[in-house]
């Protein structure tokens, strides 16, 4: 594989934050589904939509791969 076209693996604060938010949402949603709490299931599902939005905002703010605010610029 040519390194010039390597898109990277998304290892950045923005990506990790987005994944953490979505993981919390999926885990909480599963528990709330198990305990028959439909309002909280939907609230948890909203985290699955909010996670990528937060990740995108952080990436645009310089916390993405090679961003200006990351410690390691790839």
Image (cartoon, rainbow, N blue to C red):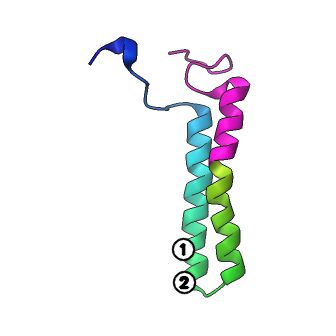
Any magenta on residue 36?
A: no
Looking at the image, residue 2 lies above or below residue 52: above
Any magenta on residue 68?
A: yes
Q: Residue at x 59, y 86 (%)?
A: 35
Within 10 Å of the Cα at label 1, are there few (<14), some (14-19), or many (20+) other Cα atoms? some
Question: Which quadrant of the view contains residue 13?
Answer: top right
Looking at the image, residue 68 lies above or below residue 64: above
Question: Which quadrant of the view contains residue 6?
Answer: top left
Helix, strand or loop at disc 1? helix
Q: How many marks?
A: 2
Residue extent of the magenta highlight? 52-74
Q: x, y percentage for residue 51?
A: 64, 50
Residue farthest to the left?
1
User: Which one is nearer the viewer's eye here, 71 or 57?
Assistant: 57
Q: Do residues under tags 2 and 1 come within 8 Å of each other at their CB atoms? A: yes
Q: Which mark is residue 34?
A: 2
Q: x, y percentage for residue 53?
A: 68, 45
Within 10 Å of the Cα at label 2, are there few (<14), some (14-19), or many (20+) other Cα atoms? few
Q: x, y percentage for residue 29?
A: 59, 71
Q: Which mark is residue 18?
A: none
Looking at the image, residue 61 lies above or below residue 25: above
Residue farthest to the bottom?
36
User: Which one is nearer the viewer's eye here, 56 or 33?
Assistant: 56
Q: Residue at x 66, y 59 (%)?
A: 47
* Residue annotated with mark 1: 30
Q: Quadrant of the N terminus?
A: top left
Q: Residue at x 64, y 75 (%)?
A: 41
- On screen, residue 24 versus residue 62, left or right, reads left
Q: Residue at x 68, y 20 (%)?
A: 69
User: Which one is nearer the viewer's eye here, 8 or 20?
Assistant: 8
Q: Disc 2 versus disc 1: distance between alpha carbons?
A: 6 Å
């Amino acid at each position: 594989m040519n390194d010039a076209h390597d898109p990277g693996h998304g290892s950045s604060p923005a990506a990790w934050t987005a994944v953490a938010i979505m993981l919390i949402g999926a885990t909480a949603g599963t528990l709330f589904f198990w305990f028959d709490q439909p309002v909280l299931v939907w609230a948890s599902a909203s985290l699955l939509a909010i996670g990528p939005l937060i990740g995108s905002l952080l990436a645009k703010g310089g916390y993405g791969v090679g961003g200006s605010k990351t410690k390691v610029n790839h």
